[in-house]
Amino acid sequence: MKKIYIAAYHQSEFGKLMGMTTPAIVRAAVEGACGEIGVQASEIGTASIGAACGFTLNGQGLLAGLIADVEGMAGKPIEAVENACASGGQAVVSVIQKLQLGLAETGIAVGYEKMRGADGKMDGKLIGEVLGYFSHPDDREGKTFVFPHIFAEVMRDYMGEHGETEAGLAAVAVQEYANARLNPKAQMRKASVTLEQALAIEGINRYVVDGLPLKTYDCSQITDGYAALIVATEEGLARLGVKRADAVEVAGWGQATDPLSRVGRDVLRPAGAYRAMNVAYAMAGLTAADVNVAEVHDCFTVMGAIGTEVIGKAEIGKGARYWVEGKAAVDGECGINTSGGLIAKGHPVGATGVAMIGWAAMQLMGRAPEGLQVNGARAAATFNIGGPICASVCTVLKAG
């Protein structure tokens, strides 16, 4: 197969895009990524865009056509993809696959989500309903806010099976809030959370579902934001004028989808996620031991733990312990979610998978913000999920 490289990465600040329209968001993402390396969009041969709530929250379909609206992009092979919260990662894989097919030598993957109104406010009930569409109908019964409820059950089951505590899982959030304070693009960069605050049921922190352990600080954010990656073959890098030393290799990738229904499958050991991650490692010729940077899909703290296990940094049931012991810290064994993760960086659903890969690439290029850069960053793993641990997109990156 052809070697694939990340030539450029660009993202908005995560949080609120206020009155920015969907066409303006898409244009800003494409032009912003091109501007990072000083090229015109006409140099990009193909594209893919991922979003989950374009129809339901933005009233906009055919997002590929909005990319084609950008000067220089018309008439090219472009498509929109949707794989719930893995839509961004799926967009990246889609572009890579087209480069492998020889349809182009350069491509751009865009992800975005506009979840708040022009005033920056959100309709929590509507968002809860819309995100619930990404679950099996049978799993929604009796749940007002479907995904927090589903993952509250996952958290309960994880704690029950592995003997983990609420404090152990809260350690994920505490570390991520600390990281986000140093990330100028993070939604929660002005906030801080101690372990005591993450555990105390007071103020904004409450149990989301009665009788289940999930609390407000265990949850990711409702976020506006966009992100874009330019990827290229070696020939494409030359066309873009980007040196290989200034690029990061996407050495391996994997995608797998488990059944949408949780009935009859073990979501604590998600088969598709492990398969996708193992495929990515095998393609890259690396193992988990080679990786010292990672971004995992912590839509809730329990997924920070499970994600740490999926990427191979902890045994099953020991993911939270990895964080408690400081191994996931910037100066730990493997810096995980140094961006702040979905919990503190923010979770603009369609942009999340793109942003995870983009941040990991920044780490490998030594361009992470001061205080967040992993010393000697050599290889990175990313794990992006959609739905109730259903769709999984994994990548392994190598420094140029």
Image: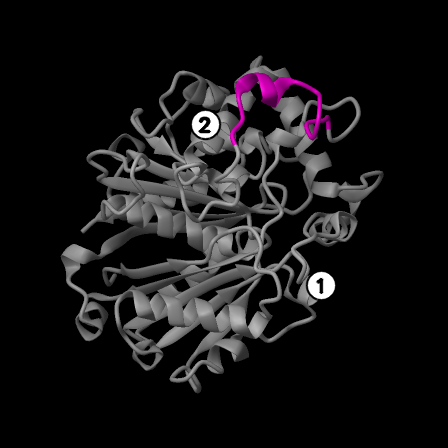
Q: Nearer the viewer, residue 201 or 273?
A: 201
Toward the right, the furthest residue is: 142
Q: Identify the element where label 1 is drawn.
A: helix
Toward the top, the furthest residue is: 163
Q: Is residue 327 magenta?
A: no
Where residue 313 appears, as percent x and y from the top left, is 37, 27
For the N terminus, which image quadrant? bottom left
Q: Identify the element where label 2 is drawn.
A: helix
Q: Amino acid at mark 1?
A: Thr
Residue bearing the label numbered 2? 175
Q: Would residue 203 appear left or right of 217 to someone viewing this image?
A: right
The answer to whether residue 99 is seen in the rendering is no
Where residue 252 appears, as percent x and y from the top left, is 31, 50
Q: Which residues are magenta?
A: 192-207
Residue beneath the point at 35% across and 41% down: 381
Residue beneath the point at 20% across and 75% down: 239
Where residue 51 appears, as percent x and y from the top left, is 57, 61
User: In terms of image quadrants, where is residue 183?
Assistant: top left
Q: Nearer the viewer, residue 360 or 395?
A: 360
Q: Would residue 302 appear left or right of 5 to someone viewing this image?
A: right
Q: Nearer the viewer, residue 93 or 74?
A: 74
In this rendering, the answer to whether 344 lies above or below 120 is above
In this rendering, the answer to whether 263 lies above or below 238 is above
Q: Amino acid at mark 2?
A: Gln
Where residue 234 appears, as percent x and y from the top left, is 19, 66
The overriding secondary structure of the stretch rendered in magenta is: loop
Q: Is residue 195 magenta?
A: yes
The answer to whether residue 201 is seen in the rendering is yes
Residue bearing the label numbered 1? 56
Q: Nearer the viewer, residue 188 or 169?
A: 188
